[in-house]
Image (cartoon, grey):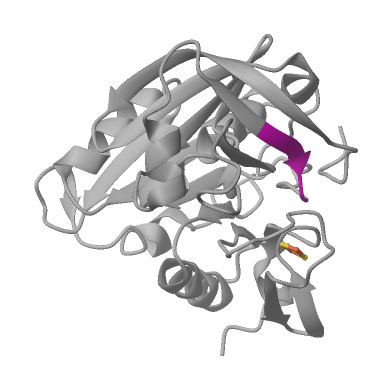
Amino acid sequence: MDAGLIPAELLQCAVVESRQVGAYRLISFVAPQIANLAHPGQFLMIRLAGSELDPLLPRPMGIHNVESDLVTMLIDPVGKGTARLAAAGIGDRVSVLGPLGMGFRLEGDAPAVLVGGGIGISPLKLLARALAAGGREVRCLLGFRTRKEAVATELFSGVRIDVITEDGSIGRLGLVSDPLPGCLAREPGKPAPEIFACGPSPMLAAIARIARECGNLAQVSVESHMACGIGSCQGCVIRGAGGYLRVCSDGPVFDVEDISWQ
Ligand code: FES
């Protein structure tokens, strides 16, 4: 499947699963149109149906997983829109547009090191599954503030996981980027590991620096405020190495060297 730019339509979908996962809320809804097309790293514009004016804009959110006709999202309820979405119960409906954007490129056979920070771990589930299904060796570095957010590691299975917390309440103490250099050595007979990352900007900047210093390829999924989600409003632009980039339609996944990290 291509990494993105698939036509999307606005759908209203019934929530069939809603449960707490530590600090986050996981909801699933039936959307075969999205499940059949979704590529790892793509996102949805999503809101609770019936809340069209409050908040005004839907939220961009990376697709956590797809299974048969089901689409699953992991929500960090930090603002009005995400809090309302996180309160959705079974039978409530969500309004969704997607899948949108350009996802991760999966070609190649290099070992994959996935790095997620906080809610940035969300899209790495679908990515880890796709890479493993393609025969790639997959290792995940998942970083959180505390043990409460780190409960979300239970959503990952079948791949090697290292947990890092900023308060040391579980796993290794420190930042998720700390152990990365030690994961990037090329093993005999294998290509150098490739990095795939999603998380807050300072984390991605640290990963860009490490990738450059260690000489590894890296793709990063960038977070941005979005209004339209489809490349029309210019509300999500970031500075790229060769000019401005729209996160929603040129990304949200970029090669690290395509972004200006100044
Ligand atoms: S959100 Fe409108 S151009 Fe990206």
Q: Position of residue 111 (x, y in %)?
A: 59, 43
Q: Was residue 70 drawn as part of the magenta stretch in this picture?
A: no
Q: Position of residue 150 (x, y in %)?
A: 25, 39
Question: Which residue is depicted at the point 43% across and 44% down?
Answer: 82
- 17 is higher (above) or lower (below) than 260: above
Q: Position of residue 90 (x, y in %)?
A: 44, 12
Front residue of this view, candidates 101 and 215: 101
Question: Which residue is depicted at the point 42% across and 67% down?
Answer: 203
What residue range appears in magenta? 96-101
| Left or right side of 190 for 37 | right
Q: Was residue 99 drawn as part of the magenta stretch in this picture?
A: yes
Can I make out residue 18 in this image?
yes
Question: Which residue is depicted at the point 29% across and 25% down?
Answer: 20
Front residue of this view, candidates 251 and 158: 251
- 23 is higher (above) or lower (below) than 157: below
The quarter of the picture where the N terminus appears is top right
Can I make out residue 75 in this image?
no
| Left or right side of 144 for 127 | right
Residue 36: quadrant of the picture: top right
Residue 6: quadrant of the picture: top right
| Left or right side of 198 for 109 | right
Q: Position of residue 199 (x, y in %)?
A: 46, 57
- 11 is higher (above) or lower (below) than 166: above
- 51 is higher (above) or lower (below) than 174: above
Q: Main secondary structure of the magenta part?
A: strand
Residue that extends furthest to the bottom in the rendered view of this protein: 262
Question: Which residue is depicted at the point 48% across and 72% down?
Answer: 210
Quarter of the picture for ligand 1? bottom right
The quarter of the picture where the C terminus appears is bottom right
Q: How many marks?
A: 0
